[in-house]
């Protein structure tokens, strides 16, 4: 995986206008290694420039990495543009996720990452997450003040990621390109990577679910639109909370049916992430001609048009996770650009760990919970059901 990333850089006609810095973390050793593209006597190579022990989940580690090896400070020159690619396990609400003590999930949260960007390099033009399930409203909203374009999967994501060679070739040729062009490059070339060597010789049936590129849904979203999305979600939350408080059983049952129609975007209903667009559409279908819901649905569709720079939907199978044991699980075949946490009716260990993070008071979702009333709706829903 890492060799392919490095070769994707070195095979380019390198102009020297772009700077490449790669951070590697060796989990079992607890050590960071930093490489940078070096030009010397008309020859280029990726050279190790530093290495030291560090704690992956300590925010100070990332403050040091970005301030020491990327620099710029919180007020960088507008001439500098930043592309950041994160490769590691995802659990929706954060990055580099791992099970901790067999019960909790430890991760570097989106709010922590946003603080690092703000205090070290100021602004990130494009953030690409090679991390499962991270195209969540909660995650993107936490990053909206420091990231312009967020490219991430709603579903699982193969370790081998995007077509780095195609992306770097475009960047070398057109470093000042519009971000929409970069978004189209990433999503448009995603499956092409797995149709070329060395991946074309690997039978996809041998992939585990999380390594199957044919079930990946990848979207590139402008995070400036997430304020408007939260506005719609707040209106929806208020309607649903008020209805449940008033004992509106008809609307409550419509919510239950709509939620059941939303297939989990994770295998075996493990996390509780659903497609937000699909839920709103299903709720309107189940609730009937409710004017307030119709208005929210219409405005949400208009915001989606502004928000999505580019989208890759999985070509199949029809059920995203259609193994023999899971064919009865209904699934959203084509995720529509953005997920949200709605943990419904199953209580897997992973879902309970996500709930613990979601409802905790330790600040992991501080800004989202302060600005969005979706969490209050979830609490009301569970109190009623």
Image: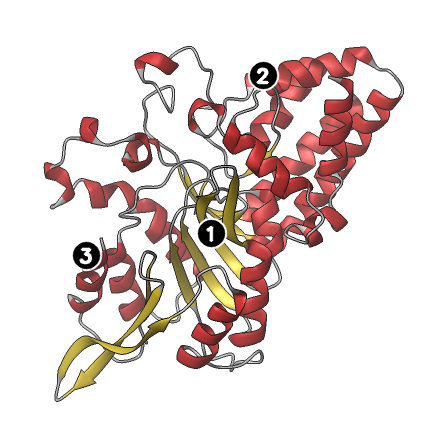
Residue at disc 1, secondary structure = strand
Coloration mode: secondary structure
Q: Residues within 10 Å of mark 1 (few under 14, many from 20)?
A: many
Quadrant of the rendering where the C terminus is positioned: top right
Q: Position of residue 272 (x, y in %)?
A: 55, 29
The residue located at (78%, 11%) in the rendering is 250
Taking the view exactly as shown, the residue that stands out farthest to the right is 246
Q: Is residue 317 visible?
A: yes
Q: Residues within 10 Å of mark 3 (few under 14, many from 20)?
A: few
Q: Is residue 136 above or below residue 286?
A: below
Q: Is residue 341 above or below residue 316?
A: below
* Residue mark closest to the camera, 1 vs 3: 1
Query: What is the CA distance from the residue labelled 2 to the residue labelled 1?
Result: 28 Å
* Residue mark closest to the camera, 2 vs 1: 1
Which residue has dot 1 on it? 95
Query: What is the CA distance from the residue labelled 3 to the residue labelled 2?
Result: 41 Å
Q: Position of residue 160 (x, y in %)?
A: 26, 48
Residue at disc 2, secondary structure = helix
Is the residue under label 2 in contact with that under label 3 (CB below 8 Å)? Answer: no
Q: Residues within 10 Å of mark 2 (few under 14, many from 20)?
A: some
Is the residue under label 1 in contact with that under label 2 (CB below 8 Å)? Answer: no
Q: Position of residue 219 (x, y in %)?
A: 45, 44
Query: What is the CA distance from the residue labelled 1 to the residue labelled 3?
Result: 22 Å
Q: Nearer the viewer, residue 280 or 176?
A: 280
Q: Is residue 289 visible?
A: no
Q: Is residue 284 left or right of residue 383?
A: left
Q: Nearer the viewer, residue 156 or 237?
A: 156
Quadrant hosting residue 300: top right
> Could you tell which of marks 1 and 3 lies nearer the N-terminus?
3
Q: Is residue 64 left or right of residue 363?
A: left
Which residue has dot 2 on it? 260
Which residue has dot 3 on it? 4
């Amino acid at each position: 995986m890492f060799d392919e990333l490095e070769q994707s850089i070195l095979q380019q006609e390198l102009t020297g206008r772009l700077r490449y810095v790669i951070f590697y973390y060796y989990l079992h050793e607890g050590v960071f290694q930093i490489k940078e593209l070096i030009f010397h006597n008309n020859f280029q190579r990726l050279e190790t420039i530093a290495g030291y022990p560090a704690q992956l989940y300590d925010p100070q580690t990332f403050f040091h990495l970005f301030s020491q090896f990327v620099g710029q400070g919180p007020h960088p020159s507008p001439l500098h543009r930043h592309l950041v690619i994160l490769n590691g396990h995802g659990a929706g609400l954060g990055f580099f996720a791992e099970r901790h003590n067999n019960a909790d999930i430890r991760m570097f949260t989106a709010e922590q990452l946003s603080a690092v960007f703000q205090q070290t390099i100021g602004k990130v033009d494009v953030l690409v997450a090679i991390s499962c399930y991270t195209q969540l409203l909660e995650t993107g909203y936490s990053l909206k003040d420091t990231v312009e374009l967020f490219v991430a999967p709603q579903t699982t994501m193969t370790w081998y990621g995007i077509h780095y060679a195609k992306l770097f070739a475009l960047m070398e040729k057109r470093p000042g390109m519009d971000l929409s062009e970069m978004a189209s490059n990433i999503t448009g070339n995603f499956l092409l990577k797995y149709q070329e060597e060395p991946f074309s010789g690997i039978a996809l049936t041998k992939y585990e679910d999380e390594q199957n590129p044919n079930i990946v849904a990848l979207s590139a979203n402008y995070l400036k639109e997430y304020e408007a999305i939260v506005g719609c979600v707040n209106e929806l939350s208020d309607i649903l909370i008020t209805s449940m408080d008033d004992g509106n059983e008809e609307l409550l049952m419509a919510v239950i049916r709509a939620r059941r129609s939303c297939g989990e975007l994770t295998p075996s209903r493990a996390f509780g992430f659903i497609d937000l667009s699909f839920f709103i559409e299903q709720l309107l279908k189940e609730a009937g001609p409710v004017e307030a819901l119709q208005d929210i649905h219409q405005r949400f569709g208009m915001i989606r048009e502004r928000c999505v720079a580019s989208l890759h939907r999985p070509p199949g199978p029809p059920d995203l996770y259609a193994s023999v044991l899971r064919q009865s699980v209904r699934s959203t075949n084509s995720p529509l650009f953005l997920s949200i946490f709605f943990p419904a009716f199953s209580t897997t260990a992973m879902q309970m760990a996500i709930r613990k993070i979601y409802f905790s008071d330790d600040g992991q979702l501080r800004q989202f919970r302060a600005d969005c009333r979706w969490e209050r709706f979830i609490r009301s829903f569970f109190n009623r059901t």
